[in-house]
Image (cartoon, rainbow, N blue to C red):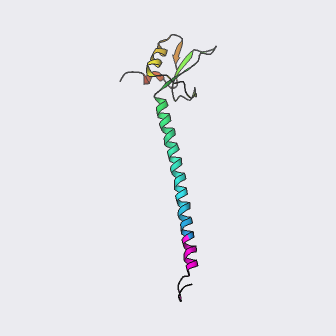
Amino acid sequence: MSGPGGISDLDKNRALVEWLEWQLRKARNRVRELEVQEEQERRRREQAHAALRWKIQPQRSSSAALVHRGDCALYPVEGGFLTREEAVIALAEPDIEACQICKPETGLVDG
């Protein structure tokens, strides 16, 4: 009950529930936004890390084995990455070539 012209306890609590539900929706939306941002950042870090590594595409009957940068889309495999030293050794082999698209040797030159 309330006094004359006042708001009842029931109405006050209904308003409070509506406000709390609005706050909860707002907080859940923010959590979803932050999760998306976090996932995008994780993917960006993984891609940047892959760009600093190398991989070898095995020889096929019609072509030589190829060394690619870790993020080259022409040979999209996960795992099996080479270290810098392994990539240098591989490119020195006569039957292994560098990918002409991603140019892995540019990441191997000493700065």
Please tell me whether residue 30 is drawn above or below residue 10 in the rendered image: above
Q: Is residue 99 visible?
A: no
Q: Is residue 62 left or right of residue 50?
A: right
Q: Nearer the viewer, residue 19 or 70?
A: 19
Q: Nearer the viewer, residue 14 or 62?
A: 14
x, y percent for residue 60: 62, 16
Q: Residue at the spot x=54%, y=66% of the render?
A: 20
Q: Nearer the viewer, residue 61 or 42?
A: 42
Question: Residue 14's quadrant in the figure?
Answer: bottom right
- In the rendered structure, does residue 2 fall within the stretch colored magenta? yes
- In the rendered structure, does residue 18 fall within the stretch colored magenta? no
Q: Residue at the spot x=52%, y=16% of the render?
A: 97
Q: Nearer the viewer, residue 7 or 105?
A: 7
Q: Quadrant of the N terminus?
A: bottom right
Please tell me whether residue 12 is drawn above or below residue 50 in the rendered image: below
Q: Is residue 44 left or right of residue 14?
A: left
Q: Is residue 96 visible?
A: yes
Question: Residue 2's quadrant in the figure?
Answer: bottom right
Q: Residue at the spot x=54%, y=18% of the render?
A: 66
Q: Which residues are magenta?
A: 1-16
Q: Quadrant of the C terminus?
A: top left
x, y percent for residue 48: 47, 34
User: Extreme bottom residue here?
Assistant: 4
Q: Residue at the spot x=48%, y=30% of the render?
A: 51
User: Extreme top residue here?
Assistant: 94
* Circle count: 0
User: Extreme right residue here?
Assistant: 61
x, y percent for residue 42: 50, 40
